[in-house]
Image (cartoon, rainbow, N blue to C red):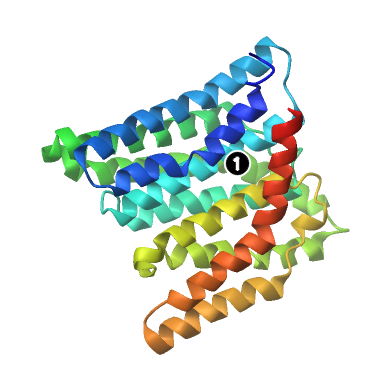
Amino acid sequence: MYSLITPNRLTLLRIFLSPFPCLLLLSESYSGKISALIAGFLLGITDYLDGILARKHKKVTTIGAILDPIADKIFVSSVYLVLVYLNYFSFLPVFLIILREILVSFLRSWFPDKIKISKIAKLKTLFQMSFAGLAVFLYVHLPSYISLINYFLWIIAVFSYISATPYFCKVWYKVKEFKKNLKNFFKSLISLIYPLGLLLTFPLAKNLFWINITALSFFFIKRGLVKGSPKWAYEKIWISLFIVMMLILEYMYSKSLFLSLWLILILSFVKDGLKSLKFMWRVLKLQ
């Protein structure tokens, strides 16, 4: 049985099934929301089962340490953005929460040895996942308490940045020593306008919001799979600039992002998705 259910496969299962509770939430039915709560709970449990399995069977691997934060970021960002689309959450605190994940993903791709998952970061993820479930529960069973949701959402946002403070401090001291690749580091920093563009245009995407979520998920996967700053850490800046310019121009001209988002879906699959999926398929077969 263990040969089929390995820690890494369990983590990959969480990545592949992250859209499932989102789809259930979008059904807007009572049974769909309850099913989404159950599915989200079960996926959240796998976040701890994979670690328990890895330690029990002495299968703690580098790949597992890389995949685990990827799965957490995809799950939280997907669910939170869907809750924004459904008007359960305000956009601004969710924007800040996901911005934190984008920044940490970027820094981890350059300094993987400096940014390892801390206990406070794990606690942050637990709070984020639990709060999403609590928010759905309040909307379904205790609508009189809905007004409290966004107050607590701001607390989650603040705590998310508190949990990232040790990462930022470690990287700050490392950057000052990082003279050889400092130019490439700052060039790569410009490429962050791509995920930021996806995030900022989410409220404007309307029914194509799922493209923003999908492209962001591919970004988290690809960034998370970078180890020791190989070529994936060096983004082609012109691609990011082209995508953002395309979004701006189409919205200025037609007040729509229809063509831009479909093109982004294709580009993100080619740019980030194919390599990431191939890598995960190898992990699925071997581990």
Decide if residue 93 is on the left or right side of residue 63.
left
Question: Residue sitting at 31 percent across and 33 percent down?
Answer: 35
Between residues 167 and 129, which one lies in front from this camera angle? 129
How packed mark 1 is, by other alpha carbons closer than 10 Å (few <14, some 14-19, many 20 or more), is many
Q: Residue furthest right?
A: 180
Which residue in the protein does label 1 denote? 70
Q: Quadrant of residue 11?
A: top right
Quadrant containing the C terminus is: top right
Point 58% across, 74% down: residue: 243
Horizontal relation, residue 109 to residue 84: left or right:
right
Judged from this view, the residue extending furthest toward the left is 144
The x, y position of residue 135, in whole percent, is 27, 38
Image quadrant where one finds the N terminus: top right
Image spot of residue 109 (x, y percent): 72, 49
Is any atom of residue 239 visible in this view?
yes
Where is 4 relative to 96, above or below?
Answer: above
- Residue drawn at x 31%, y 44% is 25
Q: Residue furthest bottom?
A: 253
Where residue 93 sits: x, y (%)? 37, 52
SS under mark 1: helix
Tell me, yes or no, if residue 114 can be seen here. no
Q: Amino acid at mark 1?
A: Ile
The reply, left or right, for residue 273 in relation to residue 79 is right
Residue 87 position, x and y percent, is: 26, 54
Seen at 69% across and 30% down, the residue is 64
Against 158, is 51 above or below?
above
Name the residue nearer the viewer: 136 or 164: 136
